[in-house]
Amino acid sequence: MAARPDDKLNVIGRRQRRIDGFDRVSGRSEFTDDIRLPGMLHGKILRSTQTHARIVRIDTSKAEELPGVKAVVTHKDAPDLMFSEHQPVLAGDVVRYVGEEIAAVAALDLLTAEEALELIEIEYEPLPSATTLRQALREGAPVLHVRSPDNVGPTMEKDWGDPDRGFAESDCVIEDEFRTPMQHNTLAELHVALADFSNPDKLHMYTPTQGAPMYQMELAKGFGLETSQVRVVYRNIGGAFTGRGRPKPHHFVAALLSRKAGKPVKIKATADEEFIMFRASGETVYKFRTGVTSDGVIKALEADITFDAGGHDEWAMILWLPSVYLNWVYQAVGVRYRGRFVFTNTVPKGSHHGGIMGRMSAGWQQHIAHVAQELGMDPADLHLKNAVMPGHESPDGSVFASCGLRDCIKAVVDRSGWKHKYGKLPKYRGIGIGLGAQASGSKAADNDTSAAMVKIAADGVVTLYTGIPDMGQGSHTVMCMIAAEVLGTEPESIRVVQGDSDITPFDWGAFSQRGTFTTGNAVKAACEDARQQLAEIASRELDVAADRLEFGAGRVAVRGNAEQSMSFSEVANKSLHSTEGRFVMGRGFFNSPKPFGALAFSFGAQVAEVEVDPVTGAVTVDKVWAAHDIGRVINRLAVEGQLDGQVFSGMSQVLYEECKVEDGLILNPSRLEYKLPRAYELPEVDYTLVETIDPYGPFGAKEVGEGPIVVSMSAVAAAVQNAVGAMVPEMPMTPWRVLRMLRATADGSTDVGKAWSEGLD
């Protein structure tokens, strides 16, 4: 019994339409807000109106007396219910940002809940506040937390390899500074949680999520339950972009209200609340330093990053992710990293699309282009000279078993006509190249496991049970393609059961680019288990050894003799109706043998060509050439769609997106005011899919999740840099900032950092 050889794959590599496409476009897809439970109440959260204040008094009596109100909760109802190590779910004595959760109500209808919030009386004692990094770091700044008298929270300092030697061996050391603003993930589906805690022994949580286990663990810890006592149900999900990796305060509040009221409670964000509840990226300052020889060999890389944590430090991973990323692109002797959180009186921060590295890369790759300029080199040549290769072991210990980075660079340079354009385009036109890498299924826990199950009915229909959510990226279609390839059937004959932690097998979820890689390996193993069972039945029926059978085109045949075969459904039927009555059920799991980090890495290169309007400062992205090393293409149609989406989101962050904040209050909390490009502004994208056949991925596949956006942001930023004549030190590169750059470089200057920083608040 054998699967088809790699050169005879029937399903993998095709252009497969989404298996759930009809439901999506017809409106039949069910989202969390579509769910109604018997007796369901509506919850609303009372939020702080102060940037920093002491809570002197809370009076909820009038709200409690309002007809239709079934529960009111404040800190006193759950003083030990913590969202993070130092942060209660509902504020106790002090609030530290506008929007912090103070109280909540549950009522029969939404209007009554909103009216009840207005009846809650709060008396504040205002405290001094610091709402920007500069304010928080000034001498004598208001202190947000006693444990951090200088407002500096957790810090990470790490040397990989020998950066001191690398800088000592360098002929030239270049330094640059870059800033990014607070940005929002702009999810298609607003935050929503429906909690049913009416049975104190079981919490049912309905919510969009990237993975159930993290929600189960944190909610269980908060309410003193075992993880098996928390059921997480998720249906379709309207995007995540790193924004749904763990529960947020409203999940705890909904459960708390449900427990007190004895009824299910739904909390859904309004458009304004969405910008408070989001926990995306905050203001960040990057200082880059690179040591290089006169002939262009990068010896040492250094990054010093200051993150605005907001009022509380919630996402520790923000500190360490950039440190390892610096190791994955160039062959440097050493890497030095320093990251620190700074507390400000603003909404706590998380991560935007691109997993922190995208925003950093928009500055870092401009910095590398600046290095090339100082050396008098073509940046594409500098990239190619220093790019990592297959088998390379980086200073952080990552080993690249497959790596097509150099192939990607060569592809985009060739297809874009780079050599005929770089330095030769008309004024106000620019071309830029960016590189990037991304881990496939980076392991952050010893049991970073995905499991899968399949059952095969007598008519040959396969049911796949998986815990991986599909957030719009097409994971379930990919899983069906992997299953169909192993079993020799078609994706359309596979049904997916997902979205319920009480039913589906364990899966950490769809983050760290682990869907195709980790869950795909689990699905492949489960189907191989089922195929082995089917082969035992078929071998008896066909009177041949099981290892001589092959599965394909809906049949099980003797290798080399297609006439001696049975249909897939016949074999399944024979199995169920055999003497033992075997009902075929396969199981599989995958847990990387590596104790920490990733087994596989994807790589990419992109070239962007832009035009700058010298009158308005507006930037138009004309075309992007994208090459991505994905190991092996599973669904070519989905890969191209992912590349389109990543280019769109990448240019959106670089050119448009910014939360405008004044005194801790977000001034543009809506899709009308928070600027995003329109669909027609997506540039033409030229695709090159580089297949390196990774030894660890399912059928050799790697990620194509957030890997491309890291590259898109760097390519677009580098193109604008090329068009205006100097590194643009701040994002987004809005028209007024671009005009400022054009004026600053009008005299031919390429060092505008000092002039730019003097204009910052």
Image: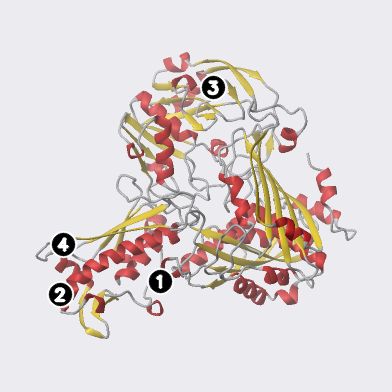
> Can you say whether 312 is above or below 545 in the image?
above
Residue 720 seen in render: no
Are there few (<14), some (14-19), or many (20+) residues within 10 Å of tag 4? some
Q: Residues within 10 Å of mark 2 (few under 14, many from 20)?
A: few
Identify residue for label 2: 540
Position of 220 relative to 18 (above/below)? above
Q: Secondary structure at mark 1?
A: loop
Along the line of sight, the residue nearer the viewer: 208 or 699: 699
Residue 404 left/right relative to 417 = left
Residue type, numbered disc 1: Ile
Q: To which quarter of the image does residue 741 belong? A: bottom right
Q: Are marks 3 and 1 in contact (CB under 8 Å)?
A: no
Q: What distance separates the C-alpha of mark 3 from that of mark 2?
A: 70 Å
Please state the horizontal and vertical placement of residue 458, each as a whole percent of the image. 18, 64
Closest to the camera, between mark 2 and mark 1, is 2
Q: Mark 2–mark 1 contact, CB under 8 Å? A: no
- For label 3, the residue is 92
Would residue 370 appear left or right of 239 to someone viewing this image? right
- Residue 331 position, x and y percent, is 66, 65
Query: Of callouts 2 and 4, which one flags the residue occurring earlier in the amino acid sequence?
Result: 2
C-alpha span from label 4 to label 1: 29 Å
Q: Earlier in the sequence, mark 4 or mark 1?
A: 1
Q: Amino acid at mark 3?
A: Gly
Disc 4 designates what residue?
582
The earlier-in-sequence mark between 3 and 2 is 3
Location of the C terminus (image quadrant) = top right
Q: Check whether the beta carbons of the residues at disc 4 and disc 3 lie within 8 A of each other.
A: no
Amino acid identity at mark 4:
Arg
Query: Mark 2: which amino acid?
Result: Arg
Determine the CA span between mark 4 and mark 3: 59 Å
Marks 4 and 1 in Cβ contact (< 8 Å): no
Asked if residue 258 lies left or right of residue 513, the reply is left
